Image: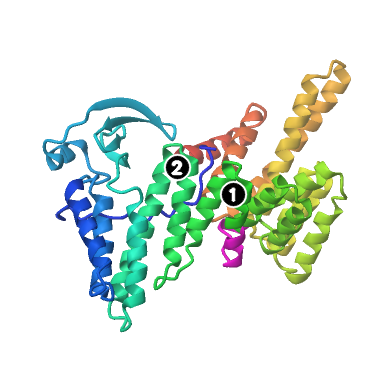
Amino acid sequence: MKRILIALAVLLAVQVADAQVKSPEAAKKAVLAAEEASQNPKKNTKVATWLKLATSYMDAYDAPVGNVLVNSPRVQLQMMMGNEKPVAVEEVVVDGMPFKKEVYANKNLYFDGTDVLRIVEVTVPVFEDPLAGALAAYAKAYEVDVKQSKTKDIVAGIQAIQQRYFNDGMNQYSLGDYKKAGELIVKAAAASETAPNSVVDTTALYNAGYIYWASKDFETAKNLFEKCLANNYYYENGEVYAKLGDVYFNLGDKAKGVETLETGFVKFPQSQSILIGLINYYLESGENTDRLFELIGQAKQNEPNNVSLYYVEGNIHKQLGDFDKALAAYKECATVDPNYDFGYHGQGALLYDKAVELSEKAQNELDDAKYQALVKEYEQVLLDAIEPFEKAFEVSQNIQVKLNAAEYLKNIYYRFSSVEDKYMEGYKKYNEYVKANVQ
């Protein structure tokens, strides 16, 4: 799970270095006083009463952290924290990286290898969920603010709560507590929808959905991904459809899973995640894979000049093991758009993979005549890959596509470098390009 990156839009709740942060004791006392005022009939109709309660809860949230600022060097923090000293120091691994964990009475600080603070984990909050208290107070402030004179302040407060919940959720994700991470990010989304902010935070919904999906809590993930789609949020290249389709399959609703993937495929035909999900379904279910080409055909009717559809068609044939049809589809890309680099690259990669397959087959062949025939075929297919790779390298404006093509070409030319000088020259050309552009 940790190897898969999710969409991150970490909205850091920035503390002001010069701000006066209350001690936990003082913050608790302030909240209790503000709560008492909010119960007073003479005061609880005033917006100022509820704003005071909200900010008191926010102060209570910040109190255990004190003057600690994320991304600060340890030396700077030591000056800011004064006499506050850790009770223990541990070497830990967080998200696959080594960290030094300093344990304090009410929090843990995580420093990376450069001695910079990256994560603050509050272990003893002043209240169990002070942000919930603050959010409820802001909601009440909006309710009693009949003149809407404080709407801007209320919105700013709600957004600060949203940011803190989201940030805490991402910290818990990094620390490996996925259940807590999902809960906190869902709270961030709920905070964002609170009036008068009233914004659906689709990024938070997707992140929470991803975490629940990866944790195999498919029912919760389903609700979150469905809400993303209801709000026209698909994430990169329709990834929400791919994840939701997988969720339905895991919940045993194959019909809904296929429907979701097919809907996503029509909207995002270039999505490899959706495509692989569909291919796996049709192969595993034994159903007719012609349905995939029906979908491609429908898309072509709607967008006959969409060259990517021919590229996707080639990918499907390649996944299904039909070399000739895959090659024909990749070649068709050049007819639709002579400058479409992926078509040329797909053609070259298909030929290269075929050459590797022939090479492996030759190595296992004991009959010398058959072995020689396979080697000859292997070499010809490998040489055939040069032209499409060079065309991809020539027309592409994408450095990664050019680099990838150059890597293939470097290897092919090296294979024949002892045969003719032109192959050695080709090897030198692309080897130099790769060395000059790989960081």
- State the residue at coordinates (83%, 23%): 372
**In the picture shown, does residue 100 fall above or below 236?**
above
N-terminal of the two: label 1 or label 2?
Answer: 2
Q: Is 66 covered by the magenta stretch?
A: no
Query: x, y percentage for residue 381?
Result: 76, 37
Residue 35 lies left or right of residue 304; in this view the side is left
Give me the disc on residue 173.
Answer: 2
Quarter-of-image position of residue 71: top left
Badge 2 amino acid? Tyr
- The color scheme shown is rainbow
Q: For this rendering, which residue is in front, 437 or 89?
A: 89
| Horizontal and vertical percent position of residue 190 | 46, 61
- Label 1: few (<14), some (14–19) or many (≥20) C-alpha neighbours in 10 Å: many
State the image quarter where residue 425 is shown: top right
State the quadrant of the N terminus: top right
Secondary structure beneath dot 2 equals helix
Q: In this orientation, does residue 337 appear?
A: yes
- Neighbours of disc 2 within 10 Å: few (<14), some (14-19), many (20+): many
At which x and y percent is residue 30? 19, 56
Q: Nearer the viewer, residue 217 or 206?
A: 217
Left or right for 267, reference 370 = left
Residue behind mark 1: 393
The residue that appears at 59% across and 49% down in the rendered structure is 393
Which residues are the magenta region? Answer: 226-238
The label shown at residue 133 is none
Instruction: Please provide percent x and percent y for residue 267.
Output: 68, 64
Give the alpha-carbon distance from disc 1 to disc 2, as whole Å: 40 Å
The residue located at (61%, 33%) in the rendering is 411
* Quadrant housing the C terminus: top left
User: Is residue 211 depicted above or below 149 in this figure?
Assistant: above
Front-lying residue, 105 or 422 = 105
The answer to whether 190 is drawn above or below residue 374 in the figure is below
